[in-house]
Image (spheres, grey):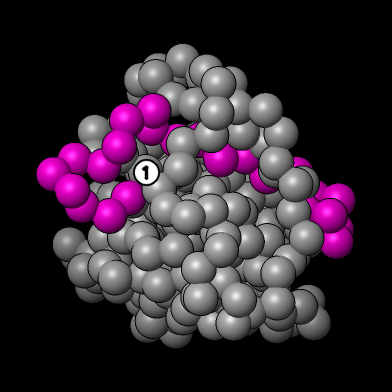
Amino acid sequence: MTAQRYGDGGTSDRGTAHRKHPVSGGPVVQLPTAFGEFIAQAWIDEATGVEHLAVSSPNPPRNGTLPLVRLHSECLTGDVFGSYRCDCGEQLAYALELIRDEGGTLLYLRGQEGRGIGLANKIKAYALQEAGFDTVEANEQLGLPVDARCYKAAAQILAEMGLHEIRLLSNNPDKQNRLAQAGVKVVEMVPTEVPSREENLRYLQTKKERMDHRLTLADPAAAGTGSFDHEQD
């Protein structure tokens, strides 16, 4: 089985304008899931040793549209345990459903827990959030970056897969900007907003107001002292 490809695989003029980040891909395998049939390929960031996973629709995009791409930062608490402190697990499910129906790829980016600060530091940030700080302030109190993620490996993986022009599944315009800097053209931002909960409304409000995420939030006035914060998109 060969990898799902959507373009020339990294030989375009766009790719030559940027220094290649060293990545290597493994075999492509079938991945039947609760969301449908996918194909999967593991990738290794040769500069850091971190392993990532591309989960792709086996079918080309519908109606000649560009493929959907989701860069999903690892979130153990949300993706595995279904934490209500964030919307990460629900965004993951939503993205897989759209990619299944419309074609494209989800890159599951490991090593990006808590916007890149790691699991232990994320739990420390939770404690500060429960003391009243928002997600930005909590990282600052710990002396950590608000967002420490790097997308160079992700951009190179997309290039190796021939994904030079994409529709990006995200509410975060910073991802669009960072991919553009790495040579991947985002022609459309496709929202991944999922319904908010009482437990994550304050966190979502913080992302909208302090991190410029494109969120509507059905009832932003309801954010109050009882809500928890979390981390990423």
Front residue of 208 and 42: 42
Look at the image and say whether residue 52 sits in the magenta stretch. yes
Residue at point 24%, 33% (across, down): 101
Left or right: 150 with respect to 79? right
Q: Is residue 22 above or below residue 221?
A: above
Q: Residue at x 54, y 82 (%)?
A: 181
Q: Is residue 10 left or right of residue 45?
A: left
| Residue situated furthest left in the rendering | 63
Element marked by disc 1: strand
Task: Name the image quarter holding residue 20.
Answer: bottom right
Image coordinates for residue 83, horizontal then vertical, percent: 52, 41
Residue drawn at (67%, 28%) of the image: 27
Nearer to me, 191 or 78:
191
Could you tell me residue 55's position as x and y percent?
A: 50, 35
Tell me the quadrant of the picture where the N terminus can be found: top right
**Image label count:** 1
Q: Is residue 116 above or below residue 96?
A: below
Look at the image and tell me whether residue 206 can be seen: no
Q: Which residue does the numbered mark 1 point to in the structure image? A: 104
Magenta segment includes 60:
yes
Image coordinates of residue 162 in percent, x first then y, are: 48, 53
Q: Residues within 10 Å of mark 1 (few under 14, many from 20)?
A: many
Q: On the picture, is 106 further left or further right than 157?
A: left
The residues colored magenta run 45-67
Tell me where residue 160 appears, x and y as whole percent.
Answer: 59, 53
**Image side of residue 45 versus residue 59, left or right:** right
Kind of residue indicated by mark 1? Gly
- What residue lies at 56% left-to-right and 40% top-to-bottom? 54
